[in-house]
Image (cartoon, grey):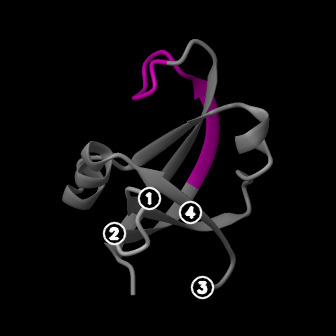
Amino acid sequence: MAGTHLSLVLKGEWYDKIRAGTKTVEYREDKPYWRARITNAIETVSFRRGYGSDYPLLQADVISIIKQPGLHCDLKHNGKVFAIIFNNVREAE
């Protein structure tokens, strides 16, 4: 993989929506843990359905990452969130 990459583990519901093409933004709370990992230099993101190493894996290209209020996103978070906007979702090799 060229460029900077981010790996995320998802619950089945969110993974399935990404795979179906109905979810094109993934959210993470604006907290120190994610601030250290999420930068605008990220070019690709992978999504694993659960924590098992043999679980399905998708890959996508990152279009942009923005901070936004979290109340009206999947997280329903009362604060800022990172919105990771992606496209070109594919099965990881």
Determine the CA span between mark 4 and mark 3. Answer: 12 Å
Label 3 packing within 10 angstroms: few (<14), some (14-19), many (20+) = few
Between circles 4 and 3, the one closer to the viewer is 4
Q: Decide: is 24 above or below 19.
A: above
Residue 68 vs 59, above or below: the answer is above
Instruction: Check if mark 2's residue and mark 1's residue have beta carbons within 8 Å.
Output: yes
Pointer 2 or 3: first along the chain: 3
Label 4 crowd (10 A; few <14 / some 14-19 / many >=20): some
Residue pointed to by mark 4: 7
Q: Quadrant of residue 42?
A: bottom right
> Which residue is disc 1 drawn over?
51
Q: CA distance from mark 2 to mark 3?
A: 20 Å
- Secondary structure at numbered mark 4: strand
Q: Report the side of 55 relative to 61 (left or right).
A: left
Residue at 46 percent of width and 57 percent of height:
86
Q: Nearer the viewer, residue 14 or 86?
A: 14
Q: CA distance from mark 3 to mark 1?
A: 21 Å
Real-space Cα separation, disc 2 to disc 1, in angstroms: 7 Å
- Look at label 2 and name its amino acid: Tyr
Front residue (pair 8, 42)? 8
Query: Which x, y percent locates residue 72?
Result: 43, 19
Residue 47 x %, y %: 43, 61
Q: Position of residue 69 (x, y in %)?
A: 58, 20
Disc 3 is placed on an element classified as loop
Task: Say what amino acid the circle numbered 1 marks.
Answer: Tyr
- Which mark is in front, 4 or 2? 2
Instruction: Write down the residue under mark 3.
Output: 1
Query: Which label belongs to residue 55?
Result: 2
